[in-house]
Image (cartoon, rainbow, N blue to C red):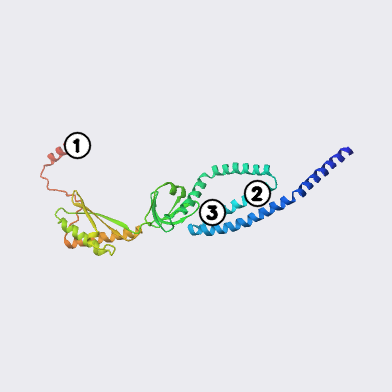
Amino acid sequence: MESTITEAFNNLITKLQGWLNAVIQNIPNLILAIVVMVASYFIATYIKKLVLKLVSHKVKQQSIANMIAKISAVVIVMAGLFLSLGILNLSKMLTSLLAGAGVAGLAIGLALQGTLSNTFAGIVISFRKRIQIGNWVETSGYSGEVIDVNLKEFVLKEADNHIVIIPNKTILENPLKNYSLANKMRVFINCGVGYESDLEQVKDLTQKTIANAFSDVKSAEDVEFYYTEFGDSSINYLCRFWINTSDLLEKKRVKTKAIIEIKKAYDKAGINIPFPIRTLEFNNKLSFDEAILDNQYSNN
């Protein structure tokens, strides 16, 4: 029994001496690995500040800029970690870490597929110069001002002050109309006048009225006027002109003012804008029996 304990104790001493010798032999590598890790930390801090400064000039969303800066810092630290493990000749541990990171990354990616899609879509949208905060856009059936683009969602404020939150992935995969990119917008007005109207007079009066109402319209010739059809009760026309604005709400205000001014001008000139009328006649001379027969005939 005593010999067994002595043998075990000697084995332990031998093992500890082997570890001590291994540590002493690898002290230079250990010091170098520590230096690499510390250097990678400071380099990552500097890279984070530099990336944040550069990205902030391109991306107005601070949350996305911070995320990109943090990702760059993590990449630098991970590179320092793998380099340190290589210096310590821990290739098996390095391989295990890489394999574990791959499996964990796959599991996390499958679990957070929707979230990651929105995150990367938000990053892509933030770098698009044609989509900026403050733009008036229309997408996915909604129209409003862009008030925020973060890592998860695209936020619009509609004309009625309602807030619409749309996933970034939806914005990236669907068409988007940006009204703020152009500095000019065209206003369309559809109307009709009575068949008894002087069509040349209607055309000239409409063009002059719009030209006098808006400073953006230099002359009556800048107002396009086209008769489109002979309607049921009116001769219909299309009138359109350009205004210097990129605001959709301003376009609606201009259209409202144009309709008001055209109505005033037509009333003053005696031009009729027809509307559907239903006429009921009560002077029918048919007898009661004939009316019943007619009703039964129509039902059959």
Instruction: Name the secondary structure under disc 2.
Output: helix
Give the amino acid at mark 1.
Asn
Residue at far right of view: 2
Q: Which numbered mark, 2 or 3, is in the foreground of this view?
A: 2
Q: Is residue 239 left or right of residue 108?
A: left
Q: Is residue 45 left or right of residue 144?
A: right
Q: In the rendered image, which residue does mark 1 sit on?
A: 299
Residue 4 seen in the current view:
yes
Which secondary structure, mark 1?
helix
Residue at numbered disc 3 = 68
Residue 60 shows in the view: no
Pick whichever of labels 2 and 1 is earlier in the sequence: 2
Image position, residue 126 (x, y; %):
47, 54
Q: Where, quadrant-wise, is the C terminus in this rendering?
A: top left
Q: Position of residue 168 (x, y in %)?
A: 46, 50
Q: Position of residue 283 (x, y in %)?
A: 12, 48
Disc on the earlier residue, 2 or 3 = 3
**Disc 1 to disc 3, C-alpha distance:** 75 Å
Residue under pointer 2: 83
Identify the image quadrant of the N terminus. Answer: top right
Looking at the picture, which amino acid does disc 3 mark? Ile
**Of pointers 1 and 3, the one earlier in the residue sequence:** 3
